[in-house]
Image: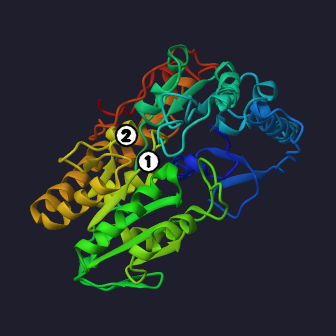
Amino acid sequence: MKFLFVHQNYPGQFLHLVRHLVAAKRHEVVFVTEPNANEIIGVRKVPYARPKLDITDTHIAARELDNGVRRAETVAKTAYGLRHLGYTPDIIIGHHGWGEMLNLRDVWPDAAMLGYFEFYYQHDQADVGFDPEFPAASLDFPRIRAKNAINHVALNLGGAGQTPTDWQLSTYPDWARRRIDVVWEGVDLATCRPDPAIRKQTLKIGDMAIRPTDKLITYVSRDLEPYRGFHVMMRALPDLMRARKDIKVVMIGGDGISYGAAPRTGGNWREVMLAELGHDIDPTRVVFPGRVDYLTYLAALRRSDAHVYLTYPFVASWSLREALAIGCPVIGGDSATVREFISHGENGLLTPCLDPRALARAVLGLLEDKALTRGLRAGARGYAERRLAMADYLASYCGLIERLTGENPAPAAHPTPVTGNAPAPRQGRLAPRARPRSGAAASRRLVAAAE
């Protein structure tokens, strides 16, 4: 088969699927993206120049659509170049969030299309207005509603859609949900695995040495900002510092803005929170190493005595899935996003999202309770093996591709039921656009994820 992937930050959410397809050694995989240094052997990367986004005169409510259609135009020109070179994909797979795929139906009208629908913006049911410290102004509601313009155009392209969690699907209107399948994302369980031996060694992260006798609390976010509960985590630190002298804290993440807004006072959120709390925090026991390499990140999670994961009701981070797979004792904020992954007392603990005192009490209670820690570690890893197995995820994805194209792109040599419990993608109501290659291929369903 011929695959065309589209994502402005190659490979984005498609890393594992692309590797899976390349490993089959029978497909042609092309990836359209903005230029970056990432490479996967076996993938032909086709960069496009990011269009100039001179939108100062565009109404603020229309700027996201303006950005999207400019990208769509640029990507379509790139696609026409591929078509003139003789390339016609069997299926186009990409992320609809930036508008890149909006014009590809004009280039290849007969290709199947599978779009990643990540989130439907609302002004009263999810992230906006969730935190009373940062209230939403009603004058901003039109802009928030208008952020769904790309979503709406994409949902009417005649292709199919997928999203990684039931909660993310629930953010979409009823009429849209029928067009989107849930494909539960997996984790590489061989890479993200517990390693008890690391607890017997001294681990260095940034300028901090974590010794075997220390109690390590970890926090991870792409960027340190309120959307991921950074301000709550910071405000829990003084109680933690006072309660135990053996606590050390590693807070991994950059100083940029991935979601939400920058501080109104200027600077970044790390500087703002340190200005508020620095006199109550022992700087020798808290380290901010920034964004770290993947091996350092894995080492921190494997060594962690308590991993804190906080978020507004929004898209779940990959770090939550990976922390569970590693067997971290996770303390998660009690939001709809996290409840889909954590059952309190079984594979993690839940604490009120915006209450730093409650968070500190939960962390300290966990550090004191060895039996609870052992149970949560085992529960987290067991949950990951049942629900986050990469084989189940890839089987679900390939099953959805087969439904759209009539061919399973990576059939098993000896088909057997998948052993995990990741939900199979639920079939939507859109008929496949691509013609099946044969009647046998169209009816073949070699691998299905267990319910």
In which quadrant is the N terminus drawn?
top right
The x, y position of residue 284, in whole percent, is 40, 84
**Which residue bears the numbered disc 2?**
335
**Which residue bears the numbered disc 1?**
311
Q: Secondary structure at mark 2?
A: loop
The x, y position of residue 440, in whole percent, is 49, 21
Q: Residue at 81% across / 25% down in the picture?
A: 106
Nearest the viewer among 339 and 362 is 362
Q: Amino acid at mark 2?
A: Ser
Left/right placement of residue 390 relative to residue 67 reads left
Tell whether label 1 touches label 2 (CB within 8 Å).
yes
Nearest the viewer among 19 and 241 is 241
**Total numbered circles:** 2
Q: Residue at 13% across / 58% down in the picture?
A: 372
Neighbor class of circle 1 (other Cα within 10 Å; few <14, some 14-19, many 20+) is: many
Left/right placement of residue 257 relative to residue 439 reads right
In which quadrant is the C terminus drawn?
top left
Which tag, 2 or 1, sits closer to the chain's start?
A: 1
Q: Amino acid at mark 1?
A: Thr
Q: Residue at 85% across / 35% down in the picture?
A: 73
The x, y position of residue 207, in whole percent, is 46, 85
The x, y position of residue 445, in whole percent, is 42, 27
Q: Residue at 35% across / 62% down in the picture?
A: 236
Neighbor class of circle 2 (other Cα within 10 Å; few <14, some 14-19, many 20+) is: some
Q: CA distance from mark 2 to mark 1?
A: 7 Å
Q: Secondary structure at mark 1?
A: loop
Examine the rendered structure and indicate whether residue 125 appears above or below residue 377.
Answer: above
Examine the rendered structure and indicate whether residue 128 appears above or below residue 205.
Answer: above
